[in-house]
Image: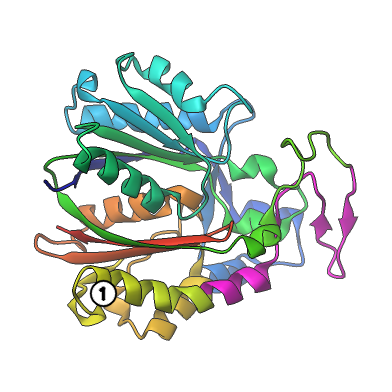
Amino acid sequence: MKAFIQGISYHLPDTILTNKEIVEQFPEWTEEKIVSKIGIKERRVAGEKETAADMAVMAAEKLFTEYSIDRSSIDYLIFCTQSADYILPTTACIIQDRLGLSTSIGAIDVNQGCSGWIYGLSLAKGLLLGEMANKILLVTSETYSKYLHPRDKGNRTIFGDGAAATLIGKEGIAEIGNFSFGTDGKGANNLIVKTGGARQRLPLNDLKSDDFGNPKSSDYLYMNGSEIFNYTLDVIPLLASNTVQKNKMSMDDIDLHVYHQPNQYISSFQRKKLKIPQDKYYCYFENVGNTVSSTIPIAIKEAIKDGSIKDGYKVLSIAQGLGYSWGGVVFYF
């Protein structure tokens, strides 16, 4: 038995945050500087009362309509987010009810970041090959904007909110190949929101500024950009090599590379370090930003639409994220 992606749809919130708006708040920057460095012109931001679950429902409904999917055929739901509606209950259970899915299905949350879609696919493939489910709905959705301090100009230029819905079954548009994974929890503090969980439930109100005037607080998302960058360049080459080897091929056999889409700065270094020709390295973040666990499915959806992915293509997708965690997989279109 094999596992396939049967369809991908995505949803973005209505509010657009442009570089012009960011520059109005931070006049020491220019629109040109933001674009030249990170390659992002605009990103979507969830409304004040709009949650990751709301966007997940919209993405799933779009998937059902676009691919004429009978929702009663779904027998497992995986919801990947770090922006859960509540500490408890499981947001996947709430989404099951809102989508009108059967009460005879499994529904779980996966708390994973940028590598979450690949991890979610591996769980879905395992459920399918283990004959525990026949059609799995995997939804990734994040509202990182709610974790960012208003004066955090660096992260506000990078991250965008969005959701993607993927259906996995026994046939479809792309066979899901073999996976490779990695984890190193020593890097946990380099991308973290320290308060709100069981270890520190209440805000610490410890806001301070670094030497460059950027806010740093336990109550908001903190990212050590230089450490994340170094870790990325350390793990990506081995991850790419391990993933193609597990699929009994080499990097030369890959027709298109669709990796996690952090920003132009990191993606450019990744491509050059792996010596990938520019025409084989697909990017889609200019108008959506870094949507965390949804970047790869959004990019694959667009690559299919614009013809960058063709029938017969072998596509390598790898992602690195907070935790640290990383994963890779090959798709056979």
Residue 95 sits above or below residue 173 on the image: above
Report the residue at 26% width, 79% height from top.
251
Report the residue at 35% width, 86% height from top.
275
Q: Is residue 100 left or right of residue 33?
A: left
The x and y percentages for residue 114 are 49, 54
Residue 7 sits above or below residue 289 on the image: above
Image quarter for residue 186?
bottom right
Image quarter for residue 143?
top right
Dot 1 amino acid type:
Gln
Q: Does 207 lie within the magenta span?
A: yes
Dividing the image into 4 quarters, which one contains the C terminus?
A: bottom left
Residue of label 1: 245
**Callout 1: SS:** helix
**Start and end of the magenta stretch?**
205-232
Report the residue at 34% width, 73% height from top.
242
Viewer-closest of 11 and 120: 120
Mark 1 surroundings: few (<14), some (14-19) or many (≥20) residues within 10 A: some
Q: Is residue 232 left or right of residue 73?
A: right
Viewer-closest of 233 and 132: 132
Report the residue at 58% width, 27% height from top.
85
The x and y percentages for residue 1 are 11, 46
Q: Is residue 260 visible?
A: no
The x and y percentages for residue 46 are 57, 36
Viewer-closest of 17 and 198: 198
The x and y percentages for residue 167 are 25, 37
Q: Does 326 lie within the magenta span?
A: no
Q: Is residue 169 left or right of residue 47?
A: left
